[in-house]
């Protein structure tokens, strides 16, 4: 999957979080994609658990709960099981 998809997803996420998407046609134009493609992004985000709603008065998408997408590689994640294993080894 090309990097631009992730970039668009992050842009959509950011604009939703700040409630600055505008109408669907405006958002699609801003992202240089078709409205149909925009709706596919929104559908995918909803399938991944994003509580996306649309406010007709403010003409913007928003999240009905706090949160957002974080699509980044993080180095050296320490899992709870790794910490527990290290602790047990030191006790033994």
Image (spheres, rainbow, N blue to C red):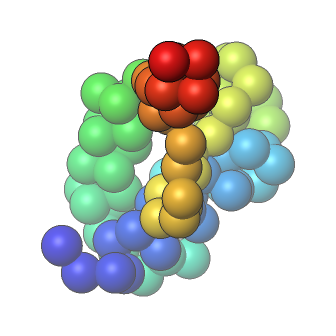
Residue 19 shown left or right of residue 71 in the figure: right
Q: In which quadrant is the N terminus drawn?
A: bottom left
Residue 72 shown left or right of residue 60 in the figure: left
Residue 83 shown left or right of residue 7 in the figure: right
Q: How many marks?
A: 0
Give the x, y percent position of residue 74.
Answer: 54, 61
User: Does residue 43 appear in this view?
Assistant: yes
User: Does residue 25 appear in this view?
Assistant: no
Which residue is found at the position 35% from the left and 30% from the top?
Answer: 48
In the image, 28 versus 42, the foreground residue is 42
Give the x, y percent position of residue 22.
Answer: 67, 54
Furthest toward the front, the residue is: 92
Give the x, y percent position of residue 40.
Answer: 26, 48
Residue 6, relative to residue 85: is it above or below? below
Give the x, y percent position of residue 30.
Answer: 56, 76
Which residue is found at the position 55% from the left and 42% from the top?
Answer: 78
Residue 56, relative to residue 24: is it above or below? above
In the image, 34 versus 82, the foreground residue is 82
């Amino acid at each position: 999957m090309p990097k631009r998809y992730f970039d668009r997803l992050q842009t959509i996420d950011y604009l939703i979080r700040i409630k600055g998407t505008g109408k669907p046609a405006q958002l699609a134009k801003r992202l240089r994609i078709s409205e149909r493609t925009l709706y596919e992004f929104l559908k995918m985000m909803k399938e991944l658990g994003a509580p996306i709603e649309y406010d007709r008065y403010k003409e913007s998408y928003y999240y009905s709960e706090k949160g957002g997408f974080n699509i980044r590689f993080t180095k050296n994640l320490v899992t709870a099981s790794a910490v527990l294993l290290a602790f047990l080894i030191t006790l033994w």
